[in-house]
Image (cartoon, helix red, strand yellow):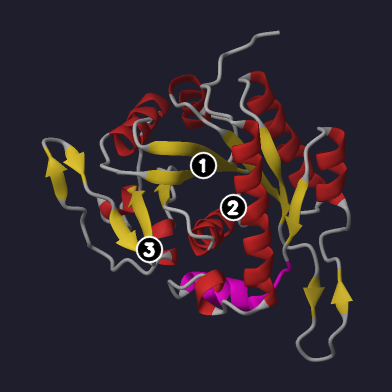
């Protein structure tokens, strides 16, 4: 896409693993490294980036031309979401083709301008939007978010396999909710198991980009519209996200992954 150097899909095999929270913080971490960043909330059924970026309910994007939206800028990130176009309480009772069409409109009818990276917060699973993305968008790479739990890992593997089939490079795996440290006694425990992210990264010959803790502050900051990277910029969580961001961008630059994917049925 004109003016956008890299498009990165942030995906998960299942819901509830913290993909949207990771996407928001990754966008802010990339911006903290001096990059121009955009974020498309492609979860049409359950958009959440508007709240995470503190965009007031009811705020609508301005028009940048005929049938072209200006993205809403929040915390230095250019954002677009279905939440900006409909009442957040209204359910999107749409069939797959309508959802895929809405995704294409949000992507192609937004005046993104010059961007180093456009992150796409994918809906969970391997459905219509994922297929539309791989067929019609020049995706530079994908980041897979999972927890160490065996059930989450099974679904994450499906996500990796899907991107491999459509020739989209998997830049790495982020293991979220890796450990929990008790705020009272300081005891750390791997609530969802240990080493899962590293295992699937090794299995698919990609890298483990980072391991993020299960902490109250990450949830509170995201719900409050100021994700951890900007709410606590000197904290350990922000440092972890910046390390992940550097690895992602280094992979994009070194791979020169500017070619669009092609479908393979082998």
Q: Nearer the viewer, mark 1 or mark 3?
A: 3
Residue 88 located left or right of residue 255: left
Image quarter for residue 207?
A: top right
Determine contact: label 1, label 2, CB under 8 Å. Answer: yes
Image quarter for residue 57?
A: bottom left
Q: Residues within 10 Å of mark 3 (few under 14, many from 20)?
A: some
Q: Residues within 10 Å of mark 1 (few under 14, many from 20)?
A: many
222 within the magenta span: yes
Out of 255 and 49, give the one closest to the viewer: 255
Q: Secondary structure at mark 1?
A: loop
Query: Of callouts 2 and 3, which one flags the residue occurring earlier in the amino acid sequence?
Result: 2
52 within the magenta span: no
Residue named by callout 2: 19
Give the magenta range. Answer: 213-223
Query: Of callouts 1 and 3, which one flags the residue occurring earlier in the amino acid sequence?
Result: 3
Q: How many badges with numbers are in the image?
A: 3
Residue 149 located left or right of residue 245: right
Magenta: predominant secondary structure element? helix
Residue named by callout 3: 76
Q: Secondary structure at mark 3?
A: loop
Determine contact: label 1, label 3, CB under 8 Å. Answer: no
Q: Residue furthest left?
A: 66
Residue 63 x/y as whole percent: 14, 47
Q: Nearer the viewer, mark 2 or mark 3?
A: 3
Image quarter for residue 178?
A: bottom right
Query: Of callouts 1 and 2, which one flags the residue occurring earlier in the amino acid sequence?
Result: 2
Residue 31 x/y as whole percent: 48, 60
Residue at image location 64% in from the left, 77% down from the top: 216
On residue 122, the disc is 1
Q: Secondary structure at mark 2?
A: helix
**Is residue 41 in view?**
no
């Amino acid at each position: 896409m004109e003016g956008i150097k890299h498009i990165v899909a942030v995906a998960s095999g299942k819901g509830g693993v913290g993909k949207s929270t990771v996407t928001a913080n990754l966008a802010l971490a990339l911006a903290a490294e001096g990059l121009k960043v955009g974020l498309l909330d492609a979860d049409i059924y359950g958009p959440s980036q508007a709240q995470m970026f503190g965009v007031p309910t009811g705020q609508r994007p301005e028009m940048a031309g005929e049938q072209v939206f200006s993205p809403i800028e929040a915390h230095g990130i250019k954002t677009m979401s279905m939440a900006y176009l409909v009442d957040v309480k209204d359910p999107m009772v749409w069939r797959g083709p309508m959802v895929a069409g809405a995704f294409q409109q949000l992507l192609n009818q937004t005046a993104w301008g010059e961007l180093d990276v456009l992150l796409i917060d994918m809906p969970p699973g391997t459905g219509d939007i994922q297929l539309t993305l791989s067929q019609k968008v020049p995706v530079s790479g994908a980041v897979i978010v999972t927890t160490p739990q065996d059930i989450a890992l099974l679904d994450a593997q499906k996500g990796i396999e899907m991107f491999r089939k459509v020739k989209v490079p998997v830049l790495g795996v982020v293991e979220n909710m890796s450990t929990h440290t008790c705020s009272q006694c300081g005891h750390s425990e791997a609530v969802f198991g240990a080493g899962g992210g590293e295992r699937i990264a090794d299995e698919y010959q990609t890298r483990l980009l980072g391991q993020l803790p299960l902490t109250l502050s990450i949830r509170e900051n995201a719900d409050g519209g100021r994700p951890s990277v900007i709410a606590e910029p000197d904290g350990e969580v922000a440092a972890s996200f910046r390390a992940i961001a550097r690895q992602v961008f280094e992979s994009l630059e070194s791979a020169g992954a500017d070619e669009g994917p092609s479908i393979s049925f082998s």
